Image (spheres, rainbow, N blue to C red):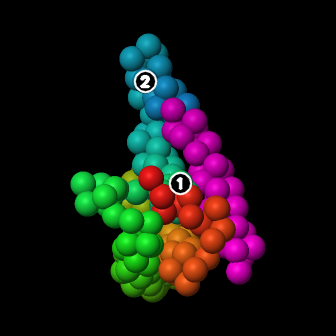
Amino acid sequence: MTKGLKVIEAVNIWVGRIASYLILAIVGVVMFEVLARYIFNAPTKWSNEISQYMLAAVAMLGGAFCLVDGGHVRVDIFYRGFSPRMRAIVEVMSCAMVVLFVLAIVWKGGELCYEALIENKKSMTILELPLFPSMFMVPLGAFLLGLQSIARALRGLLLLMGGDSPEIRAMFEG
C-alpha cells in the first residue's frame, strides 16, 4: 500500500514542480509589461490576462504539492501538543473533510469546464481566449488535492493500525 502512496506523492511533486515554472513565466510576462509600459510607452493588452491564467494554474496545481510537504495551515497551538496517535486521528478526520470538499469542486468544476469546452466559451477581453484550459485547472487541481488527502489519511490509518514504519511515524512526530 505504501508503494501506491509514494506514487501519488511522486505525481503531486512532479505536477507541483512543473507548475512552479509557471511562476518564472509570470515574472517574465510582468517584466515585459513593465518594460513595454514604462520604458517604451506601449502597454500590452494581453499581459494581465495571461498572468492571471498562469497564476490560477499555479494556485490550483500547487495545492497538492503543498500538502505533500505538510505546508497547509493548521492550528499548531493545539496540534503540536498532541501525541503522534492523536495527530494521526486529526489528520484522518481533516483529510476526510477535504475529500468531501474536493468532490464538490471536481463535480461542479468539471461541469463548468465541460460546458466551456462544448459551448466554446471565450474570455470577455480583447484576446477572447478559450476558457476551457483555465477552467480545467480547477477540477484537475482539486482531484490531485483529493488524491493527496487520501494518501495522508491512509498514512494516518496505517499509524493507527500499528504501522511502525519510520517514514509513517516521522510524518506524525514533532
Of the residues shown, which amino acid type is indicated by label 2? Val
* Image quadrant in which the N terminus is located: bottom right
Q: Is residue 120 magenta?
A: no
| Residue placed furthest toward the right | 3
Q: Is residue 154 visible?
A: no
| Residue placed furthest toward the left | 77
| Vertical order, 60 against 20 (above or below) | below
Q: CA distance from mark 2 to mark 1?
A: 34 Å
Q: Nearer the viewer, residue 119 or 171?
A: 171
| Residue placed furthest toward the top | 39
Residue 34: x and y, percent? 43, 24
CB atoms of marks 2 and 1 within 8 Å: no
Q: Provide the residue designation for mark 2.
A: 34
Q: Provide the residue designation for mark 1.
A: 69
Of the residues shown, which amino acid type is indicated by label 1? Asp
Q: Which residues are magenta?
A: 1-27
Label annotation for residue 172: none
Q: Nearer the viewer, residue 14 or 172?
A: 172
Q: Earlier in the sequence, mark 2 or mark 1?
A: 2
Q: Nearer the viewer, mark 2 or mark 1?
A: 1
Classify mark 1: residues with Cα within 10 Å, few (<14), some (14-19) or many (20+).
few
Residue 134: x and y, percent? 50, 63
The mark tally for this picture is 2
Residue 110: x and y, percent? 49, 81
Which residue does the image show at 51% across and 32% down from the upper left?
27
Q: Is residue 11 magenta?
A: yes
For mark 2, give the secondary structure: helix
